[in-house]
Amino acid sequence: MSPEAVRAHAAGGLAALLVDAVDGGASVGFLAPLETAGAAAWWSDVAEEAAAGVRDVWASHAPDGSLTGVVTLVRTGTANGRHRGEIARLLVHSSARGRGLGRRLLDTAEAHAAATGLTLLVLDTQTESPAERLYRGAGWTAAGTIPDFAADPAGTLRPTTLYYKRLG
């Protein structure tokens, strides 16, 4: 998505995806209840990062045009880390799960990362979450688990597993 497209969808479909994820218990950096305005503001910040070339955004759409999923790739800005990026906020709407959409979004971000010279990707996810099955199935390697790393949407501290994947 272009920065303009992210801005255009921030208050609508993108905010709805983020709220749906948090409402569903996904530990994606927010506590429940997440208000639509807060989700929209976060996506507006993402649009600015996209405009600055720091974050890339891909989305999937249903036949009716509604957003069903999104993934972002954040580039590392340090001189010694320009070879790596982070997969962040892979979200699939609860109504669209179980059809391989998350895998297709992840594959798209990985292919773009490799095509633009990145050789290493990292991500983190709540330990024992459904997302772990996706990442392991896509060839990601668990690097370790940190206890009490982040609160889930209900505010309970949960462990987080760090993953990496070499590209190319």
Image (cartoon, rainbow, N blue to C red):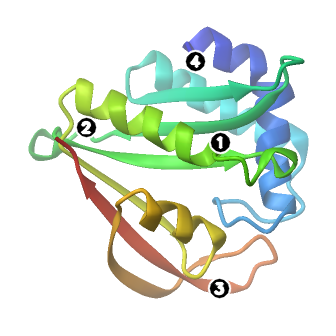
C-alpha span from label 4 to label 2: 21 Å
In the image, farthest residue toward the front: 99
Q: Residues within 10 Å of mark 2 (few under 14, many from 20)?
A: few
In the image, farthest residue toward the left: 80
Q: In the image, what residue occupies the spot 87% across and 60% down?
A: 23
Instruction: Name the spot of residue 137 as percent of width and height, x first.
Output: 45, 63
Whether residues under marks 1 and 2 lie with C-beta atoms below 8 angstroms apart, the answer is no
Residue 77's disc number: 2
Q: Is residue 150 left or right of residue 111?
A: right
Q: Please state which amino acid type lies under the numbered disc 1.
A: Leu
Q: What is the secondary structure assignment of the residue under circle 4?
A: loop
Counting residues from the start of the chain, the first of labels 1 and 2 encountered is: 2
In the image, farthest residue toward the top: 4
C-alpha span from label 3 to label 4: 33 Å
Residue 1's disc number: 4
Q: Which residue is mark 1?
A: 101
Q: Please state which amino acid type lies under the numbered disc 3.
A: Leu
Q: What is the secondary structure assignment of the residue under circle 3?
A: strand
Which of discs 3 and 4 lies nearer the camera? The answer is 4
Q: Which residue is mark 3?
A: 157
C-alpha span from label 1 to label 3: 28 Å
C-alpha span from label 3 to label 2: 29 Å
